[in-house]
Image (cartoon, rainbow, N blue to C red):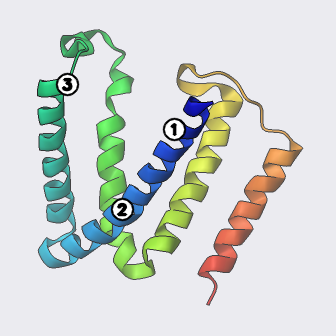
Amino acid sequence: MLVKLIFPLLALIGGMALATQGQINGGLGKKVGVIEGSFISFSIGTLALLFILLFFGNGNISSVSQVPKWQLIGGLLGAFYVVVQVIVVPKIGVSASLMAVIVGQIILGAVIDHYGFFGGHRFPIDKQKLIAILLLLFSLYLYMKK
């Protein structure tokens, strides 16, 4: 029962962190430049992760040479996301940016689930999920409409 509450709460807090990060990185990018702001953000995050790794890491980082190379693109995708947020948040705001991000995540997540890409379990897209995705797209349209 406790686990059913902890993980959604942790995800909720993670979402709140993304909202905060979007505004902070957007402001940083306006002051120092888009690429520069993204670099600064990632550098600080990398340093934080290095300290966490040094004090709490218990895995085997040297196993990185044994993983499929495509599994190493996560950092590139994260960098792309940060650059996009630095560009987009000052133009359309945090909430519209996050709404578009969430819709994009759900659409691609549904495709990944449907086909079981990247070694995942298959969760087929059915009529109900398709309607929900269309409603998400419509809600994004309404939110962005002026």
* Amino acid at the residue labelled 2: Val
Quarter of image, res 127: top right
The 10 Å Cα crowd at callout 1, few under 14, some 14 to 19, many 20 or more, is few
Q: Nearer the viewer, mark 2 or mark 3?
A: 3
The 10 Å Cα crowd at callout 3, few under 14, some 14 to 19, many 20 or more, is few
Which residue in the structure is indicated by mark 2?
A: 84
Q: Nearer the viewer, mark 1 or mark 3?
A: 1
Mark 1 vs 3, N-terminal side: 1
Asked if residue 51 is positioned above or below residue 139 in the image, the reply reads: above
Which one is in front, 134 or 44? 44
Q: CA distance from mark 1 to mark 3?
A: 21 Å
Asked if residue 47 is positioned above or below residue 20 in the image, the reply reads: above
Which residue in the structure is indicated by mark 1?
A: 6
Assign the N terminus to one quadrant of the image.
Answer: top right
Mark 2 vs 1, N-terminal side: 1
* Amino acid at the residue labelled 3: Phe
> What x and y, as percent, mark residue 55?
13, 26
Instruction: Give the secondary structure at mark 2.
Output: helix
Residue lying farthest to the front in this orientation: 2
Q: Is residue 97 left or right of residue 24?
A: right
Assign the C terminus to one quadrant of the image.
Answer: bottom right
Instruction: Give the secondary structure at mark 1.
Output: helix
* Amino acid at the residue labelled 1: Ile
Q: CA distance from mark 2 to mark 1?
A: 30 Å
Which residue in the structure is indicated by mark 3?
A: 56
Mark seen at residue 19: none
Which one is in front, 2 or 11? 2
Q: Is residue 6 left or right of residue 50?
A: right
